[in-house]
Amino acid sequence: MRVLLVEDDRALADGLSRSFIDWGFDVTLATTGAYADTALRTQPYDLVMLDLGLPDSDGLELLRQLRARKSAVPVLILTARDGLNDRVKGLGLGADDYMTKPFELQELEARVRALLRRSHGGFNHDIVVGRLIFDTLKQQIKVDDIPILLPSREFGVLEALLLQMGRVVSKDSIAQRLAVHADELADNAIEVYIHRLRKRLIPVGINIRTIRGLGYLLEQNKDA
Ligand code: CA
């Protein structure tokens, strides 16, 4: 999940960045309207946190232009302005939610998650395979409710398999997902990750089946 944090107050921006990272987001910080505008025109985001009072422009103008470009990215306005006028204007210009400073982090998190649920068509963001639960928003894997920490490459491979649960996932599409995580892959790297994941998953009752020439299939071991 990628969030663009538009906020010129450095202390607040740093605090918010840390919170969003804790909640499982990749954070891009924009401290000016110009930077935010460039970011929004060049990168995809899952969420925009928008301050209205920016040093070089007004957040509402940024929002107006964003919606004029037909972008549907969820926007949550977070501002010190609490006038009814600004609130109505912000929502009228296509903001999805509006919060005023000061605010409670807990409430912000709840609203952010609600927005993301809505923008993803209300789908349940947990993928459950037997005792394993993958929270796709938090990017967290739990077994028996205990978070499991995996090396990032192994996590990427498992994520690829979980997101396509019940389907055969080709080595190519796994490699594509790993490109997000890092550098280059040695020839048999994916086999190595699959081998390590198998060892971890067998005790949990999950198999990774090799389908010759096609790829891998994640499945629950029915006998487990
Ligand atoms: Ca500001």
Image: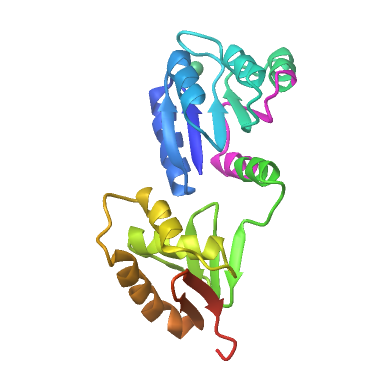
Q: Nearer the viewer, residue 6 or 211?
A: 211
Extreme residue toward the top, this view: 56
Q: Position of residue 10 (x, y in %)?
A: 39, 24
Q: Is residue 204 magenta?
A: no
Q: Is residue 189 above or below residue 212?
A: above
Q: Nearer the viewer, residue 126 or 77?
A: 126
Q: Nearer the viewer, residue 6 or 154?
A: 154
Q: Residue at x 63, y 43 (%)?
A: 116
Q: Position of residue 90 (x, y in %)?
A: 68, 19
Extreme residue toward the bottom, this view: 223
Q: Position of residue 65 (x, y in %)?
A: 61, 15
Q: Position of residue 131 (x, y in %)?
A: 55, 77
Q: Residue at x 66, y 17 (%)?
A: 68
Q: Is residue 204 above or below residue 55?
A: below
Q: How many marks?
A: 0
Q: Quadrant of the C terminus?
A: bottom right
**Rendering colour mode:** rainbow
Q: Is residue 183 left or right of residue 31?
A: left
Q: Is residue 145 above or below residue 184?
A: below
Q: Residue at x 45, y 13 (%)?
A: 34
Q: Is residue 104 above or below residue 177?
A: above
> Magenta segment range?
92-111
Can you see residue 19? no
Examine the image and state in which quarter residue 175 appears. Answer: bottom left
Q: Is residue 171 left or right of residue 221?
A: left
